[in-house]
Image (cartoon, rainbow, N blue to C red):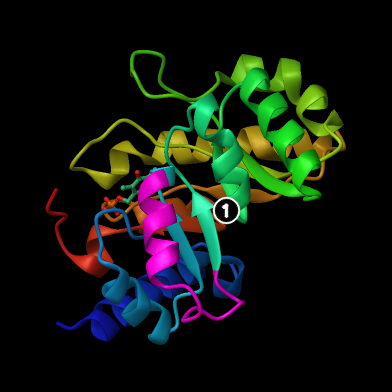
Amino acid sequence: MDLIQRISEVYKKISHAAMRAGRDPSEVRLLAVTKTVSPQMVKDAIDAGIRLIGENRVQEAEKKMEALAGEIPGTVSWHMIGHLQKNKAKLAVALFDLIESVDSLSLAERIDRYAREAGKMQKIFLQVKLSPEETKSGMSPEELERDIADYLGFSNLKLLGLMTIPPYSPDPEESRPYFRRLREIRDRLIDAGYDLRELSMGMSGDYEVAVEEGATVVRVGTAIFGERVY
Ligand SMILES: *Cc1c(COP(=O)(O)O)cnc(C)c1O
């Protein structure tokens, strides 16, 4: 299969999963994860219709954006999806349309400050960790509910939703409870009057389950670009 076929296949599976769940497929956006992928391949994916790109390292993203300068339509958005160190926050604000991996108030404060200096409203998601035994980054649901008003209070941050990465399992059904839990947390926040509707959840192995459970953004790498070579 070539790139266009693989992308079409992913779109088709997203549509079917949405319809199984009684959702409108247009509520779900495909974010192509391009870490380790060459600039030329990123360009090919964009030519094939991809409009959301995800990178997990600030410097790698910067290099790729420089290599593609002038070749990318303005309708393409770049999302930061990896753990963000505070000392990279300034560059992340300069590069990314949206930072999905905000996981602490101190990081949010930094991003807000740099966004203000840059005269930018920085879109963000909050990364939530639903499995305490994991070493992954992300705030606990308790921290989220405690601090949500603070995250919404920053003048230069626009909080649009939540992101999660469940523990890895080869069985996508193992991810379902995590996806469902993130959606329930989001729904409770909406009921409490907070306007944050986006749910970034699901990767190559489990994005169909994530769509069934309410994902509005699925982050797919391998299923589009093949196995990563580091
Ligand atoms: C790499 C990565 C993905 C994509 O993983 P695949 O299994 O290749 O689809 C999604 N989200 C994050 C945060 C990642 O780092």
Compared to residue 216, the image places residue 40 above or below, namely: below
> Quarter-wise, where is residue 22 in the image?
bottom right
197 left or right, relative to 141? right
> For mark 1, what is the residue?
96
Membership of 191 in magenta stretch? no
Compared to residue 214, the image places residue 149 above or below, namely: above
33 left or right, relative to 157? left
* Residue for point 57% across, 53% down: 96
Report x, y in % for residue 103: 56, 26
* Residue for point 35% across, 39% down: 175
Identity of the amino acid at label 1? Phe
Report x, y in % for residue 153: 86, 30
Q: Does the residue tagged 1 have its C-beta within 8 Å of any atom of ligand 1?
A: no
Compared to residue 151, the image places residue 57 above or below, namely: below
195 left or right, relative to 172? right
Instruction: Please state which of residues 75 and 211 is positioned toward the viewer in this rendering.
Output: 75
Q: Is residue 46 visible?
A: yes
Range drawn in magenta: 59-76
* Residue for point 61% across, 77% down: 74
Report x, y in % for residue 109: 72, 25
Count neighbours of disc 1 (C-alpha within 10 A) and say few if under 14, some if 14 to 19, many if 20 or more. Answer: many
Report x, y in % for residue 202: 40, 50
Q: Is residue 183 visible?
A: no
Quadrant of the frame with the N terminus? bottom left
